[in-house]
Image: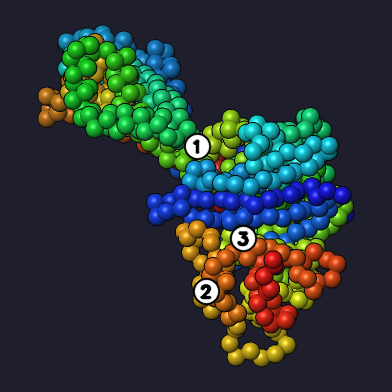
Amino acid sequence: MKPILEVRDLQVNFDTVDGTVHAVNGVSLDLHQGETLGVVGESGSGKSVSMMSLLRLIPQPPGRIVAGEALFRYGDQEVDLISLKKRPMVSIRGNRIGFIFQDPLSSLNPLMTIGDQIRESIERHTSRRGTEARKRVIELLDQVGIPDPEARYRNYPHQFSGGMRQRVMIAIAIACDPEIVIADEPTTALDVTVQAQIVDLMNRLSEELGIAVIWISHDLGVVAGIADRVAVMYGGTIIETGSVDGLYAHPRHPYTVGLLGALPKLHINEPELVNISGTPPSLFAPPTQCPFEPRCPWAFDRCRAERPPLEPIQSASNETHLSACWYDLENDRPRRRQA
Amino acid sequence: MRLDALETRGLRSPVQRFLKLILRDKAGLFGVVLFAFVILVALLAPTLAPHDPLQQNLRASRQPPAWHEEGSWDHPLGTDNLGRDMLSRIMYGTRVSLTVGFVGVVIASTLGLVLGLLAGYTGGRTDSIIMGITNLFLAVPYLLLVVVVASVLGRSLLNVILIFGFTNAPLFVRITRGEVLRIRQSGYVESAVSLGATRTRILIDHILPNLIGPLLTVATFEMSGMIFYEAGLGFLGLSVPPSIPSWGNMLAAGRQYIQFSPWIATFPGLAIVVTSLSMNLLGDWLRDLLDPKIRRSAS
C-alpha cells in the first residue's frame, strides 16, 4: 500500500538580514496509514519548520519553501501539499491534517469557552451545526478523557490544568477525523506524569481511529514510548531513520550514537553527564558537506567534500533502516564508493 | 451520588453569581451608580430642572446657594451673574458634555478600530500609509487645530464633536494596531490557522473579542478626557455658543466673579469632576467584567 504522506526533498529557507538560513535541506520521509513517526532532533535542527512547512504554516516571507513535494493521499485523492492552492490548503488544515502545538495555554483563546473552540473547527469543516455540533464536542471531550464533558463545555481555558488543556488541543486536532495529526512537542510543557497520560491517550486514539501521527520531540524516551518509526534530524536534514527498536538498538549514524550515549543512565553512577562536544552547524552556509562533520569523531576528507545521502544500511535486516553517513560504523571503515 | 450532581451542589445560581459579580467591586459599583445618575440627569433634564436654564432674572443675579444665609430653596445652587438658575443650567450642561464625550468617542474609536485593524491585519503598504497619516495627525498641535476650525467654521456642538472625534482617532488607531499585531502572534491565532480558519473567522472570533478589553479602557478614559477638554474649550470661548448652557461656558462666565460669588464656577467644576470619575471607575469595572479570568475568581 502506498504511504498516505510522501515527502520528497523538502527545502525551506529563511531570508534574514544576516543572510539566507537554510533551515531545511532536503527532507524526505514516508508516512503510512495508522503509523506513528517520531521526529527527533535538537533545537534548530529543523524538525518543527519542516513539519509546519507541510501545512505551509511557516510565515512567508521570511520563510520560503524552495523545493520539494509532499504527496498527501486521502480517500481517492492525491494532492501535493507544497504546490496546492491556498483555498484547498485551508480546507485540509484541521480537517484532513490536524496540528497540536507545544504550549496548550497560549494555543487557546482566553475569551472563548473550551466547547466553542472545539466546535469552531467542526463547523468550519463539516456540515454539523447547532445541537449536532455540540453533541460531537461533548463526545470528543469524553474521548480525550475529560470528566463531566457537558459541564466542561462552558469552561474557559484558565479553568483547565495544563494536561487538560493539551487534551482539549488533541480533541480539536481529531475533531474532523483527520488522516494525519502532527504533534509539535505536545508534552514538552507538561510534567512527567501528565506526559505519560498524554502519550497513552495519543497511542490509544491513533490505534482506535487509525490516525497516522507525526510526533515531533527532542525527548528520545517519549518517542520510544509512542513511535513505530523514528527520524533523527540534524542541521535541517534527516540523518537516520528506522524502526524504533532497530534504531535504538543499533544506531548507525555517529550523531545518533552520540545522542543515545548522552542519555543519562540510572543504573551506573556517572561522574559527569556525557555530551556531544561542539555546537550545531550554522545554517547560513549552503549545505554542501555533512552537517555533523565538525563534531564527528569518525570524520574524514570525503565528509567535507560531499554531503552523504540517506541510504539503506546493507547489514540491516529486512527493515528499512537508512543512514546518511560516509562511514561504515559496523565495519569501522569508510563506506566503499559505488561505481 | 453522581459526579455531576456533586458538582452542581454548592454552585451559585446565575442570579446569585451576577449579584456577587456586581457587588464585590465596590469602587466599580460606585462608578456605575454615579454614571447611571449622570445619564438620568441628562435624559430627564427638562423634567428635573426647576427653572428654564436660559431664563434671566437680573434682580435675582448672583444669588448664593440655598444653604447660605442669603440663599433660598427657589434656586438650590444659587444663580449666575444673569440670574439664571445654576442647578438647571448644570443639568442641561450634562447633555452637552455627555453628547460630546459619547459621540466623540464613538467617532474616534470606530475610525481607529477600522483603520487600526486594516493597518495591523493587512500590513505591508496599507499599514505604512495608514500609520504615516496617523503619525502626521499626531504631530499637528491639537489646540491650534481646534482654534482654527472653531474660528473658520464657527462655534457649534457638531464642530466640537467632529474635532474631538478626528483628533482622538490616531490614538485608537495606534492601540488597535498594536493589539492586533500582538494577538496575531498569539498561539491561539496560530492554532486557528492550523485548523483551517479563514482570515475573516480569525478576525471575528479571535482578534475582535481580544481587542474589546483594552479599547474599552481607553474609550472610557478618552470619554472623560473629552468632557474635560470640552470644558476647557468652553472656558476659552471656543466650544458651543454661549447661548447653550455647557459646563465650560459656565466656568468661563464664573471666572470674573470667583472672588465674591465662587459658586458660579465651583458647581460646574464639581460636575466635571464627578462625571469624569464615574467614567473612569466604570471603565475599570467593564474591563474586569469582560475578562473571564477575573470574572470567575471569587474576589
Q: Please tell me which residue is depicted at 21% across the width and 11% down the height of the picture.
A: B154
Label 3, secondary structure: give it.
Answer: strand
Reading the image, the residue beneath label 3 is A237
> Horizontally, is A81 left or right of A11 in the view?
right
Q: Please tell me which residue is depicted at 55% across the width and 65% down the height of the picture.
A: A289
Task: Please state the chain letter of the residue tagged with numbered disc 3 in the rendered image.
Answer: A
Q: Is residue B155 above or below residue A309?
A: above
Residue A206 spot, x, y in % from top left: 82, 54
Q: Is residue A291 above or below residue B85?
A: below
The residues bearing labels 1 and 3 have C-alpha atoms spaced at a distance of 41 Å
Q: Nearer the viewer, mark 2 or mark 1?
A: 2
Q: In which image quadrant can residue B15 be found?
A: top right
Q: Nearer the viewer, mark 1 or mark 3?
A: 3
Residue B279 spot, x, y in % from top left: 40, 34
Tags 2 and 1 in contact by the CB under 8 Å rule? no
Q: Please tell me which residue is depicted at 63% across the width and 47% down the height of the picture.
A: A68
The residues bearing labels 3 and 2 have C-alpha atoms spaced at a distance of 16 Å
* Amino acid type, residue under disc 3 in the picture: Thr
Residue A146 spot, x, y in % from top left: 78, 52
Q: In which image quadrant can residue B118 be found?
A: top left
Residue A294 bears which disc, if any?
Answer: 2
Reading the image, the residue beneath label 1 is B211
